[in-house]
Image (cartoon, grey):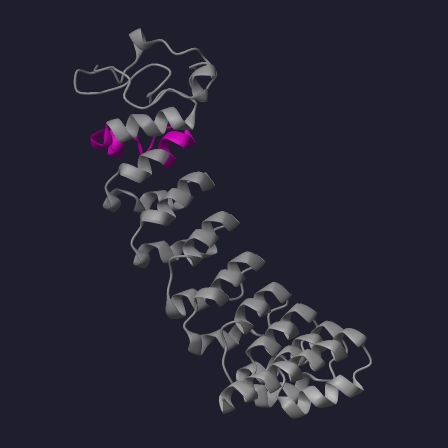
Amino acid sequence: MITGPTDPVGVEDDIPPVDWHGVPLDCTVCGTRSELIRCERGHACVQDRYAKRIDRFFRWNPQVSNDYLTHPYFEVRAIACRQADVFRLQPLIDDEDETVRLSVAVRLPLAQAVRLRSDPHREVRIRVAMRLEGRELLAMANDDDYYVRKLVARRLPEALVPRMLDDREWEVRLEAVKRVGMPALLRMCDDREIAVRREVVARLPVAQLYRMAHDPAWEVRWEVAQRAGRELARLMAHGDEEAEVRDEALARLRTLDQQTGEQHE
């Protein structure tokens, strides 16, 4: 056994060195002890319950990671996955602990990671959604968790994003609206969520803003006034029922006048 501190000492030194059963560690009976293994009680130990000490052990001794993929303590299996040979990880797709499956999802080749799309734990599916591409990712568009679907909307190829515009959660629809182009964007002018319609206004061509000029929410009309062309801004400056919208439309007219003047100088 090779010992000796290398990493800086931190708060973890206040945590007693016990194994995953809560029993104080006794290095004299440790089966891991070897002249080829570098470890340190309370700092870098595979028998410790504390994840940082386990992680440090495997960073010091990556060559033994494969040997711990079936360890009874889930933290050991999960951390060993980070250093183990990738071709040894596939059996852990069905590990009983989501922490292990999460580690596996990060490292498996995509052809194998795709099996985790339907994992029962959302964090695993989130990690998978961050890696898959194209139609493999589209298969997660109906995931039960809104954040998984939000990632799908964020990462799909642009041509597939319109598939997410009818999602039941407004945050997912908003993510999709940020990416779709015309004419798909027009579908969202009447979305029930104000935040979605405001994003529609931000992305519509100026010539199409008239579609939103009579939106029931003054916040949406205010966004329209900020980008309106001269004729629409003039109509809103004199006809909108909200003073904030009229003021913004007048400010837009002044900006347009200033821009016109600068062009003629």
Name, please, the residue furthest toward the front.
265
Q: Is residue 238 left or right of residue 155?
A: right
* Above or below 236: residue 21: above
Name, please, the residue furthest toward the left.
35
Majority secondary structure of the magenta segment? helix
The x and y percentages for residue 194 are: 69, 70
Q: Of 81 and 72, which appears nearest the observer? A: 81
Query: So how many labels did they put on this image?
Result: 0
Q: Is residue 185 left or right of residue 91?
A: right
Residue 77 sits inside the magenta stretch: yes
Which of the 4 image quarters holds residue 117? bottom left
Q: Residue at x 73, y 90 (%)?
A: 235
Q: Of 164 and 264, which appears nearest the observer? A: 264
Do we see residue 20 in this rendering?
no
Name, please, the residue furthest toward the right.
241
The x and y percentages for residue 7 are: 31, 24
The x and y percentages for residue 6 are: 27, 21
**Quadrant in which the N terminus is drawn:** top left
Q: Residue at x 36, y 48 (%)?
A: 106
Q: Of 50 and 191, which appears nearest the observer? A: 191
Do we see residue 124 in this rendering?
yes
Q: Is residue 45 left or right of residue 252?
A: left
Residue 15 sits inside the magenta stretch: no
* Above or below 218: residue 236: below
The x and y percentages for residue 263 are: 50, 88
First to last magenta residue range: 61-78
Q: Of 71 and 173, which appears nearest the observer? A: 173
